[in-house]
Amino acid sequence: MTDLNQFLSRAERLLERLEQFLPPALTEPDWSASVAFRWRRSGKAASLQPIPRPHQIRLSDLQDIDDKKERIVANTRQFLAGKRANNVLLTGARGTGKSSLVKAVLTEFSSQGLRLIEVDKDDLIDLPDIVEQLDGRPERFILFTDDLSFEDGEPAYKALKSVLDGSVAAVPDNVLIYATSNRRHLMPEYFAENAATKHLDGEVHPAEAVEEKISLSERFGLWISFYPFSQDEYLAVVNHWLGEFGVPTDAIANARGEALQWALLRGSRSGRVAWQFARDYAGRFEA
């Protein structure tokens, strides 16, 4: 009996030592605190943290991308109605409104139970834990990853791929993934990989490396592509934001030359550049 008691005592001490190496149990966030949350990791601990002041942007603020708005809004409406909907990959030129469109969707539909959870690329390996925490909730969640891209061998790549369409465990129907990227296939492509592509009997057979890179982006059911703005589109966005910022009408008309000069110096005509110019220009009229 003494030997048994000593054994149990040692086992208990061992378990106490092991506990310090285990990650703490996940705690439920205050779901009423916000409509947007961020997955934050600090050492071994990770949790969903409310974002007190989400970026409020309206769909009407996004100019000259009406076709893209229609596609993502239709997909989100289906999702909120409990119908089948797709994960979304928004790709294309920088500053053209990809992430702003996702934020505008949240603004539009948060009153209908839509919630957004921002997950950094490096934390995508935690996706199974995040999804498990959302399962059974009455809200509908978009897991949002901005500016997504991978280098070869990153563990987050396989974690995302598995959650999208490769795990034995099904993703709950109240969760979708919306991601933005400047790369359509999310990983760098090299000439040597394309050179290994073969043509057999008139069919194109991509090299294995190319197939692997395409396989992730193909797991997003809906692709929405963004392109650089024309000069007229850029100026239309400038005028919109100048009006929103309260710039007098005659001053808006006089801003054309400066707006074009601003874009030339930045080397880009995009919604982001237009918004930045409008903020600078409108600041001169503020009391």
Image (cartoon, rainbow, N blue to C red):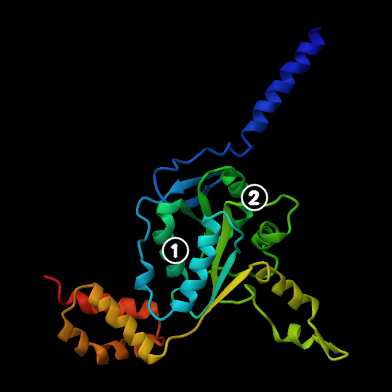
Assess disc 1: are there few (<14), some (14-19) or many (≥20) residues with their C-alpha within 10 Å of its C-alpha.
Answer: many
Give the mark, 2 or 1, whose residue is nearer the N terminus.
1
Give the CA distance from mark 2 to mark 1: 24 Å
Q: Name the residue carrying label 1.
A: 105
Q: Residue at x 28, y 76 (%)?
A: 241
- For label 2, the residue is 128
Point out the image quarter for the C terminus: bottom left
Say which quarter of the image contains residue 91: bottom right
- Label 2 Cα crowd, 10 Å radius (few <14 / some 14-19 / many 20+): some
User: SS of the residue at dot 1?
Assistant: helix
Residue at coordinates 70% horizontally, 74% vertically from top-left?
Answer: 214
Residue found at the far right of this picture: 201
The residue drawn where x is 19% and y is 89% is: 254
Residue appearing at x 80%, y 12% in the figure: 4
Q: Give the label on residue 192, or none.
A: none
| Identity, as a three-letter code, of the amino acid under mark 2 | Pro
Is residue 241 positioned above or below 228 on the image? above
- Look at the image and tell me whether residue 220 can be seen: yes
- In the rendering, at what x and y percent does residue 30 appear? 44, 40
Of the pair 246 and 42, the residue shown nearer to us: 246
Q: Amino acid at mark 1?
A: Val
Relative placement, left or right, of 190 versus 228 is right
Residue 37 is at least partly visible in this image: no
Question: Of circles 2 and 1, which is in front?
Answer: 1
Please say if 29 is above or below 67: above
Q: Position of residue 15 (x, y in %)?
A: 69, 27
Q: How many marks?
A: 2
Left or right of 139, for residue 22: right
Question: Which quadrant of the rendered structure holds the N terminus?
Answer: top right
Q: Nearer the viewer, residue 183 or 88?
A: 88
Q: Percent from the top left, x then y, of residue 231?
A: 37, 91
